[in-house]
Image: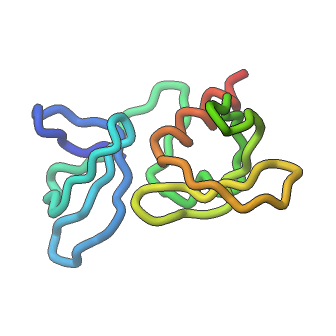
Amino acid sequence: MNAKYKDGRFYSAFITSDNNNGTYNVYFLGDGLTFDNVPHDCIKVPLIKGGKASSDVDSYVGRVFFDEGGKDFEPGEFEVVGVGNDNTYVCQRVGSNDVPEEFDMGYTIRRVNLYESE
């Protein structure tokens, strides 16, 4: 879904919780910011032309992406195995029994979409 940002424009976001009073807590995928108590009229379904969109955080569970690694972190494929705390996905390295890693939701979604478009 899209939510209204502080500049008055709508951007991709996930609802992280329903406050049961007509407001929601929202996580913006682009910059990782969280806004609390966003009114219902500041949330809308995105217009999509020939693409895919999802407003459900669970829709990425089971999907795979490639992480390029970094200092002390080997590159490799990861599968999203669950939703973590603080706007993260729990991801397991494919073919490994290592302890799962947590990745930021926005980062994970961008990596999954890139991986699936290749």
Tell me: 40 left or right of 30. left
| Residue 115 image-quadrant placement | top right
Seen in the picture, residue 82 relative to 63 is either above or below; the reply is below
Residue placed furthest toward the bottom: 20
| Residue 58 image-quadrant placement | bottom right
Residue drawn at the location 67% of the way across and 34% of the way down: 67
On the image, the x and y values in percent for residue 116 come to 70, 31
Seen in the picture, residue 114 relative to 108 is either above or below; the reply is above
On the image, the x and y values in percent for residue 77 come to 77, 39
Residue drawn at the location 25% of the way across and 62% of the way down: 25
Q: Nearer the viewer, residue 63 or 45?
A: 63
On the image, the x and y values in percent for residue 3 come to 25, 45
Residue drawn at the location 16% of the way across and 57% of the way down: 38
Quarter of the picture containing the C terminus is: top right
Q: Nearer the viewer, residue 44 or 61?
A: 61
Q: Nearer the viewer, residue 64 or 95?
A: 95
On the image, the x and y values in percent for residue 82 come to 62, 63
Colour scheme employed for the rendering of this structure: rainbow
Residue placed furthest toward the front: 72
Tell me: 26 left or right of 85. left
Residue drawn at the location 54% of the way across and 40% of the way down: 109
Tell me: 14 left or right of 81. left
Q: Nearer the viewer, residue 23 or 101?
A: 101
